[in-house]
Image: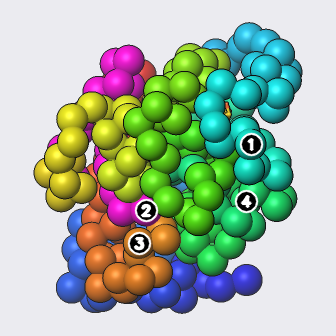
Amino acid sequence: MSTREEILFELGITPRWKLRDVAEIESSEETSSSEDLHKGAISSNASGDWSELKTTIESCDRCKLCESRKKVVVGVGDPAANWLFIGEGPGAEEDERGEPFVGRAGQLLDNMLLAMRLNRRENVYIANVVKCRPPGNRNPEPDEVDACSSFLDQQIDLIAPQVIVLLGKVAAHRVIGGDGTLASYRGVEHRYKNISTVVTYHPAYLLRNQLDKAKAWKDLCFAMDLMDKKIEQRK
Ligand code: SF4
């Protein structure tokens, strides 16, 4: 397994990056309290009938994406997670396997999570705006987003996360609203259902634009700071 320094290097984070640099993270490894910050220090009250929702989504034919999908991609992770990451929709590999973010973009997302001391099976849930693959990896169309909207809302209600991270413009438009550029959403705390919400780049974009990885890390550090504040408030 990669060391954290290797992961941060892979993310394109340079020594100039000071908000939460490698030295800080490595020193935090020595304090168990820091580890707790992002691994379940806030208990969630997620409850409700996940299995019923999953069954409903998996048999859904509310929009035309049902005609070409192979598998419905409901989501993956801890249903009582403090962290919720939301992308736009399944790609080809996700459509084959029925799990979000499993290709190269998924590997990058996993590395981003690891750098945050998280992993997709523990205290993180990963979902998409639409649960079925848009053909040709196009963006989901507005009627498809609308048709799938209640499923994402139900997932958010059941998970009751402390912080939501929106990956890319499609997720930002769906959750926060508006039609601005990604840059216009970054760097500030948004609220969705009174949940702290942060916007960053989609990992697939970062694969094509390596120089923006450091900006993505800045966004994730901002999200971690919001989580830290929530934990402090509850002490
Ligand atoms: S994308 Fe959503 S609304 Fe459309 S068929 Fe799939 S689950 Fe149903």
Mark toward the viewer: 2 or 1: 1
Q: Is residue 145 shown above or below 32? A: above
What's the image's color scheme? rainbow
| Dot 2: element | loop
User: Residue tagged by mark 2?
Assistant: 202
Type of the residue with mark 4: Glu
Q: Is mark 4 within 8 Å of ligand 1?
A: no
User: Residue tagged by mark 1?
Assistant: 67
Q: Nearer the viewer, residue 136 or 167?
A: 136
Is 146 magenta? The answer is no
- In the rendered structure, find residue 193 and report the number of the disc placed on it: none
Placement of the C terminus among the 4 image quadrants: top left
| Mark 2, other Cα within 10 Å: few <14 / some 14–19 / many ≥20 | many
**CB contact under 8 Å: marks 2 and 1:** no
Mark toward the viewer: 1 or 4: 1
The boundaries of the magenta stretch are 186-202
Type of the residue with mark 3: Tyr
User: Residue tagged by mark 4?
Assistant: 94
Q: Nearer the viewer, residue 36 or 182?
A: 182
Mark toward the viewer: 2 or 4: 4
**CB contact under 8 Å: marks 2 and 3:** yes
Give the spatial CA distance, label 2 vs label 1: 26 Å
Q: How many marks?
A: 4
User: Residue tagged by mark 3?
Assistant: 205
Residue at figure coordinates x 38%, y 48% from the top left: 170
The quadrant in which residue 173 appears is top left
Give the spatial CA distance, label 2 vs label 3: 5 Å
Mark toward the viewer: 3 or 1: 1
